[in-house]
Amino acid sequence: MPQGYFIFISPAPPAAPASPQPPPQPPHQPPHQPPHQPPHQPAHTRRAAVDDVKKKVTFD
């Protein structure tokens, strides 16, 4: 039991000041921009479908 308590107190003080330093994200691997699936491709198809629907509605 005393071991867990000691471990919990040990990493507490050194983790506080060292926490704000390692958080930076790596710029060599952005997760918001996949190179194998561009977001501008599906948008075109979706836009075309919306255009089609609008034309149909107007024609109606």
Image: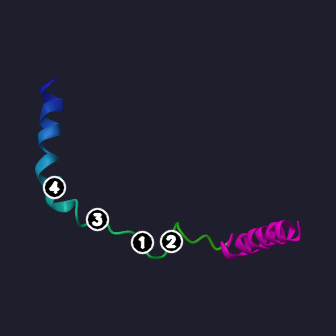
Instruction: Judge whether 12 appears above or below 23 on screen.
Output: above
Instruction: Judge whether 38 appears above or below 12 on screen.
Output: below
Q: Secondary structure at mark 1?
A: loop
Sequence-wise first label, 2 or 4:
4
Q: Secondary structure at mark 4?
A: helix
Identify residue for label 4.
16
The residue stretch that appears in magenta: 36-60
Horizontal and vertical percent for residue 27? 44, 76
Give the Cα separation between the discs numbered 4 and 1. Answer: 21 Å
Horizontal and vertical percent for residue 45? 78, 71
Name the foreground residue: 51 vs 60: 60
Instruction: Judge whether 3 appears above or below 51 on screen.
Output: above
Sequence-wise first label, 4 or 1:
4
Identify residue for label 2.
29
Which amino acid type is marked by label 3?
Answer: Pro
Magenta stretch: residue 58 in it?
yes
Numbered badge on residue 36: none
Q: Residues within 10 Å of mark 3 (few under 14, many from 20)?
A: few
Which amino acid type is marked by label 4?
Answer: Ala
Quarter of the image where the C terminus is located: bottom right
Give the Cα separation between the discs numbered 2 and 1. Answer: 6 Å
Q: Residues within 10 Å of mark 2 (few under 14, many from 20)?
A: few
Which amino acid type is marked by label 1?
Answer: Pro
Identify residue for label 3.
22
